[in-house]
Image: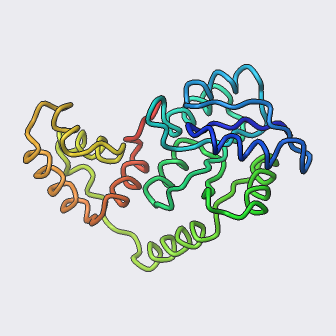
Amino acid sequence: MKILVVDDHAVVRSGLMMLLHGKHNMEVIGEAADGEEGIEAAWLLKPDVVLMDLNMPAGMDGLTATAELRRRMPDLAILILTMHDDDEYLFRAIHVGASGYILKSAPHEELLTAIRSVAAGNAYLYPTATKRLMNEYIEQLKQGEHVDTFGSLSEREREVLALIAKGFSNREIAEQLVISVKTVESHKSNVMEKLGLKTRPELVKYAAKKGLLNFE
């Protein structure tokens, strides 16, 4: 099983290579320090599994790289290996096509299980993430169907919703749309009120369902 490790921390890459290389029928065939390097290495080396970090501040982030790899190599297994136990990152990773999502704090055996699972074409989520997704699904069933008020959003409100869901701060959104931060906050409040949403992760999930996210 050929594995490519993409992480901006050299110590993490070295540790993963020591753990995996030559053991458990696995071989680490390459490493990369950011998403762009990871894409190039995957294209050249043709690994079975890519272990992809999420946040790599010095270069292309893991979400963008995952989306691009999914476009170029649809059958490639991409396992997100991150320190972020966060619903927003989890749902964004799923949206861009990650095969699995596991925490860096997970036991070694769990990581090996996750690698084998995605390599076999299955999805993998760490146990507490699976439980949260199930709880959310059950809650949605309890709430029943509701009227979708997406059509009530103005064009500017949809733009703000999309940028919020992509992880931009209010200040960054204001700069992109050439409006004040106060106006951004006003649009955000209007969007949440119209859609009946209360938290940022809920906005991310709603935007994903509406096809407003594009990380390519």
- Say which residue appears at 73% left-offset and 19% top-offset: 44
Image coords of residue 213 (percent x, y) = 40, 40
The tally of labels here is: 0
Image coords of residue 113 (percent x, y) = 79, 59
Where residue 1 sits, quadrant-wise, is top right
- In this picture, is 42 found above or below 197? above
Image coords of residue 86 (percent x, y) = 46, 60
State the scheme by which the image is colored.
Answer: rainbow
- In this picture, is 130 found above or below 151? below
Image coords of residue 214 (percent x, y) = 42, 35
- Say which residue appears at 13% left-offset and 51% top-offset: 185
- In this picture, is 139 found above or below 108? below
- In this picture, is 95 found above or below 193? above
- Say which residue appears at 15% left-offset and 56% top-offset: 190
Q: Is residue 133 left or right of residue 186?
A: right
Q: In this view, does 41 lie to the left or right of 182?
A: right
Q: Is residue 169 left or right of residue 18?
A: left
Residue closest to the eye, 132 or 41? 41
Where residue 76 sits, quadrant-wise, is top right
- Say which residue appears at 30% left-offset and 42% top-offset: 168
Which residue reaches farthest front? 11
